[in-house]
Image: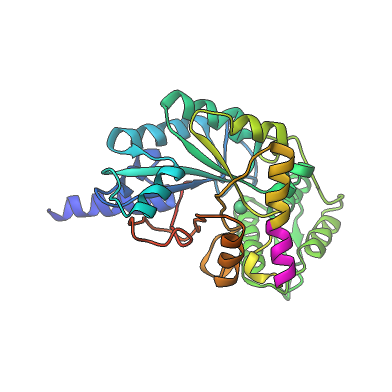
Amino acid sequence: MDMGNANAVEGAAKGAVLGAAGPGGYAAHLSPDRLAIYLLHGVVEGSSYRVRNYNRKHLEADYFRDFLKGLLAKGRPLSMDDAVRHHQEGRPYPPHSFAITFDDGFWNNLSVAAPILKDLGIPAMFYVTSGFVEDNAMSWIDRIEECIEAASPDAVKLPWRKEPDRLRNREEGILFLDEVRRKVKGDPAVDVDALIADIARQCGMPAPISSASPLDRKMTWPEVRELAGGDGFTVGGHSHRHGVLAFLGQEELEREIDTSLDLMREKAGLATRHYSYPEGLAHCFDERVIRALKERGIVCSPTAMPGTNAPEDDLFLLRRILVI
Ligand SMILES: [Zn+2]
């Protein structure tokens, strides 16, 4: 391979992580003997906001379709149940296998993503956060993003910083939100509800709780049931309140998992054996979390750590590729 090609391949692989190569770049992760599991959150018809969705948590529908077509041109879709079977039986994957997964339970999974997946004949897994479904609740970071979007404050003082952060334009807004994400995801001592209240107060608005926006609306239980009803779509758990599970005490951890599985069973009639960890980074789950999930019949819980997987890898340590 000459240097030009090597750079092109490296660029494509990098782009697949950073999104710079566009939707076609993600096929660079497909491999003859490994499984690429893609991690998405939402798909929307359009996205024009000042700071909201800056990290492309919700892809635009055309981009999503192109991303899937790029994978189909080279690879073969597997359901997560198929993936589990290959692991349990120790059988190699079909060449260039991939799986599509969504976290959190956004309504746009059903209204926008599912019809596109169905059209292309691609199965998918949807990990839903039961508390979001119960209350159409927004995640903590979406609540903070919405404050910044709606109020457009010039500056906000974060409790762990000496000076207020300036927020005069999109770039400063993004730096601010990245800093909030970094701190909350890494520091169990942060009181997230107090932080949201503080930021909302500085923005001169009530803290947002739920919203009908395509970026925020969650599925109802009947909609979760509808999504799981066919077309190779499966639903799994993703906690009740979306806190970092490894940060919770044993009692709270078990209550969090039990509540998520009980609600799914009682309100959507679904007994699932699939789960994914909120946030999903290496420090967000541990042996205790994995044991609690196994005790409740869960057989597979992928992480959000980047990478691809071999059939002999542990089903509770599977890696996923974030699509942005
Ligand atoms: Zn999540």
In x, y percent, where is residue 133? Answer: 72, 42
- Give yes or no for residue 255 being in the magenta stretch: yes
Image: magenta residue range: 250-257
Q: Can you give x and y, in whole percent of width and height, for residue 67 in the image? A: 41, 36
Residue at figure coordinates x 56%, y 65% from the top left: 290
User: What x and y, as percent, mark residue 4?
Assistant: 18, 51
The prevailing secondary structure element of the residues shown in magenta is helix
Q: Residue at x 51, y 31 (%)?
A: 61
- Residue 66 at x, y percent in the picture: 40, 32
Residue 10, quarter of the rendered image = bottom left
Left or right: residue 76 compared with residue 7: right
Q: Nearer the viewer, residue 129 or 212?
A: 129
Extreme-top residue of the structure? 119
Q: Residue at x 48, y 61 (%)?
A: 316
Left or right: where 193 falls relative to 307: right
User: Is residue 219 covered in magenta?
Assistant: no
Q: Look at the image and tell me whether residue 241 can be seen.
A: no
Q: Nearer the viewer, residue 110 or 45?
A: 110
Q: Which residue is at 55% across, 60% downward? A: 280
Q: Is residue 233 left or right of residue 191?
A: left
Q: Is residue 149 above or below residue 290?
A: above
Q: In front: 214, or 310?
A: 310
